[in-house]
Image (cartoon, helix red, strand yellow):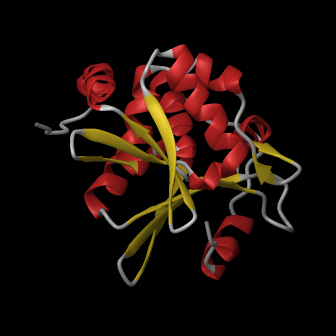
Amino acid sequence: MQLVENYTNCVYKTMHTINPTISKRQNRIIIGTILGGSSIVKPPKGRNCYLTMRSNNIKWIEHKASELNVLSSDNPFTSSKNTNRWHSLCYPIFDEYRKMFYKDGVRHIKSTILDTMYDLSMAIWYMDSGRYHNKEIILNTHVWGEKGTNTIEKFFRIGLNFSTRITTDRGRFRIMINPDSSQVFFKIISPYTHVKYE
């Protein structure tokens, strides 16, 4: 995710050495948000990392921001054209998330993280980077690259016994989940979403 300049100016002034207390629910939302494409950023001159997320759906990003308000400043939003952006303050806890989801500065997904993922994280992931088309769920996984997409597809196929396939759209990786497995997916996430499907 491209970082706009005024984010960094704000974040450098708001570094913290003591983490706020976050709940299990907030932890699961953060994990789902990262899986869905949000970034953990290490400022070039900063001590700690921070979370940044964006969406063209202002209500959705405001909802997630309200869930994570303990981690943000008083004015965490910026907008550019049709994109709404939110960022947290810098906290040591985000250094730990970066260790979980990055390797040598590049996004890296581990099967162990997927194996221990909670339903809420999956719901956030879908709402961030999934869609429903022709009775199939399409999950955008391009941010994780080809290797990461293979790891994710294996998790769904073997870990959850879903029928899946990997496709590309203009060179961008997607995971397709067949109609029957998509119905199971929706049942898993239904307590946390208001997704309507037929």
Residue displayed at 50% across by 25% down: 156
Nearer to the camera, 36 or 65: 36
Q: Quadrant of the C terminus?
A: top left
Is the residue 116 above or below the residue 172 in the image? above
Residue 165 shown left or right of residue 133 in the figure: right
Is the residue 78 above or below the residue 48 in the image? below
Residue 167 shown left or right of residue 152 in the figure: left
Is the residue 106 above or below the residue 95 in the image? below
**Residue 14, picture quadrant:** bottom right
Is the residue 3 above or below the residue 107 in the image? below
Whether residue 51 appears in this view of the structure is no
Residue displayed at 44% across by 40% down: 125
Nearer to the camera, 32 or 27: 32
Residue 130 spot, x, y in % from top left: 38, 47
Residue 120 shown left or right of residue 20 in the figure: left
Residue 39 spot, x, y in % from top left: 63, 54
Whether residue 36 appears in this view of the structure is yes
**Residue 183, picture quadrant:** top left
Residue displayed at 74% across by 67% down: 12
Nearer to the camera, 113 or 182: 182
Q: Quadrant of the N terminus?
A: bottom right
